[in-house]
Amino acid sequence: MDITTTDLGLVARVRNLSKSYGREGARVQALRDVTLGIRHGEFTAIMGPSGSGKSTLMHIMAGLDSPTSGQVWLGDAEIGGMGDAQLTVLRRRRVGFVFQAFNLVPTLDVRGNVLLPFELDGRAPTVAERDWFEQLISSLGLGDRLAHRPHELSGGQQQRVAIARALVTRPELVFADEPTGNLDSRTGREVLALLQTAARRYGQSIAMVTHDPVAASYADRIVFLADGRIVDDRGAASPEEVSALMLAMEAAA
Amino acid sequence: MSGRVLRTPLRAHGSSVLVATLSSAFGVALLQVTGVLSAVIRADDVTGSSATVAVLLVVLAVVFIVIAVYVGAVVTANTFATIIAGRTRQIALLRLVGAGARGLRRTVASEGLLVGVVGAVLGALVGTGVAAALAYGAVAADVMPAFDYSWAQPVLLLPIVAVALVTWLASWVGSRRVLAVTPLEAIAGSQERSRDEVASRPARRALAIGLAVAGLALLGLALVLGLVTPLAVLIGMVGGVLSFTGVVLGADLVIPPALRLSGRLLGGSAPTRLAAENAVRHPERSARATIGLVIGVTLVTMFGVAIASFRQLIHAAQQAEPEVYQGIDQMLDVVTIVFSVLVGFSALIAAVGLVNNLSLSVLQRTRELGLLRALGFSAGQLRRMILAESAQLVFTAVVIGLVLGAFYGWVGAQSLLGSINGSPGVVLPGVPWLVVGVIVLAAALLTAIASWAPARRAVRVSPIAALAVE
């Protein structure tokens, strides 16, 4: 019998994952034989330059894209072979997303956006989930913004709403795609600190894709990707160390 | 030069060309048929009144044509406004590199002229073809005597030129928003502002309310005078035209609240709640998309109710003197059908606009649809959301149209017939079940058609579309 993801203390993993795009002749190899586990309760950064395959890796791990070959687990479930309906339910209940462009539904107010995952699931939040919602809203400082619509909020506020939406269902894993890409550096640091807190205080597992050394320095673990392969995997590091590593990788390439 | 960059692919104008073609075909066909009928009547002039009849026919035709062209113009203006709203980024970019706002607007409007000319000419050919087929068919079936008529009448230039010019004007009105685009919108990571189209126009609102109030007062007067003289119907007509113009001008005041109300009727599941919000996301756009349908349904219902009320009276009178009223039922049936078809044509044009509006608005929401997919919206939920959106627009328009039409039809019948012999004084509104049934069926069909293509497209959107940064 195979060792399960949970036995390994992991929340998600991929094994021998490859992904290529395009037809014969004009093939682009985005990922080459990647094997990686995301550890439970950790804030993991997946780093790499543009075109390194980090976004593709995240899309596949989140069930947004399908692998060319290899296996993908979320928890103990193999998601590589799942159909659209199953993946939809999986995204709804078991993962959360934070995007670069905030991505809130413009017709809903802040409360509606944060509670959207419950609505999609066709149920009202339980009492415990209500409490958690209140706690999130107050710790993210959104208490007096609940009735506002996205266009009435600053970029940083919008991203905090997106974070609240991603955390509200207590998903197994939150995927963050360049969450600070559209923010000024001070607001960006606040957002990163919030993600870090979610991991440290509440044990929320987070996988963040970024090319920003400062963002990566908030993570507990940094995985470096280049040219579709994992080239380094280490614990927390300072922005200077991360930058140095990135530069060394550039030089080697 | 910048104009070429902004040029919209002709495919995007497909529905506007269709609308112009339909309007022009309708106008040309109607005038051609009227012309043929006049020729036939002139050849067989026993009463010596052919000139009067011919004039009457032309006047009626012109009224129907004006209605169709007006509805077509509303639809076209809305389509252009929607296309422009979807291209804000691109316009902003052109402004950023130095294009003038007025020049850009002129480019858009010149596309409108092209669309209008192409549609008007196509429509003239189609309309003449349809009229000729009808006329020769009638001759072949011995319903009508052979006639002498030239198909190239100068009067046909009227609908052709009118459609081309009105389409041009509509594109000019619809492209107003080009002027409001700032170069900054090209750079800012701008979140969509959902309420930006609601520019409050106090003068227009005041005019709309004034017209509605004055019209209602005249309608009330017509109701009272109708107890004394059938001429009251003339006052009622003026009141009807004024108050309905008020409703059309004040569509932004009336329709969004009605949409909100019908949105609440849809229920509280996530797809329908989002649909309800989407339908009022651009209140002005939704108002314009539905008002055409409101006009069509109102007019069809009005004639239907008026004739049905008349029929009730006739039936009452018939019981006393059966031989006098022989054959009148069949005649009323024919009149109902002819009027419904002629007026219903504007509803068809409006339906084209509604279908197009929904599909454009889905096209412009790709990112948001991707987001919903990423968050766990199933394909079925997405499809239900778009179906609900479509149902909400159609349902609202049809209900408003039925209510207004029934009211106008009843006022018309009452003011015309309230004083005639054997009338009970107050005429009860008759319900034209056939007309109402056809409207409801057509509405259901329209809902399904309008949501079919957009739903298919929406389901194909990959959740990754939400993550992409434009």
Image: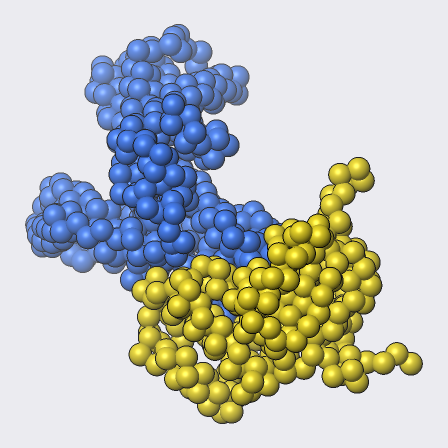
Chain colours: A yellow, B blue
- Looking at the rendered structure, the number of numbered marks drawn on it comes to 0
B91 with respect to A39 (left or right): left
B66 with respect to A29 (left or right): left
* Residue B301 position in % (x across, y down): 33, 49
Viewer-nearest residue: B315 or B429:
B429
Q: Is residue B169 visible?
A: yes
* Residue A200 position in % (x across, y down): 56, 85
Residue shown at 48%/76% (left/top)? Answer: A193
**Above or below A24: residue B415:** below
Viewer-nearest residue: B163 or B322:
B163
* Residue B352 position in % (x across, y down): 44, 40
Q: Is residue A97 visible?
A: no
Farthest-out residue, right: A1
* Residue A187, picture quadrant: bottom left
Residue shown at 15%/47% (left/top)? Answer: B204
> Looking at the rendering, in which quadrant would you find the N terminus of chain A?
bottom right
B468 with respect to B354 (left or right): right
B445 with respect to B178 (left or right): right
Viewer-nearest residue: A186 or A3:
A186
* Residue A212 position in % (x across, y down): 54, 61
* Residue B156, picture quadrant: top left
Residue shown at 68%/72% (left/top)? Answer: A234
Residue shown at 31%/79% (left/top)? Answer: A144
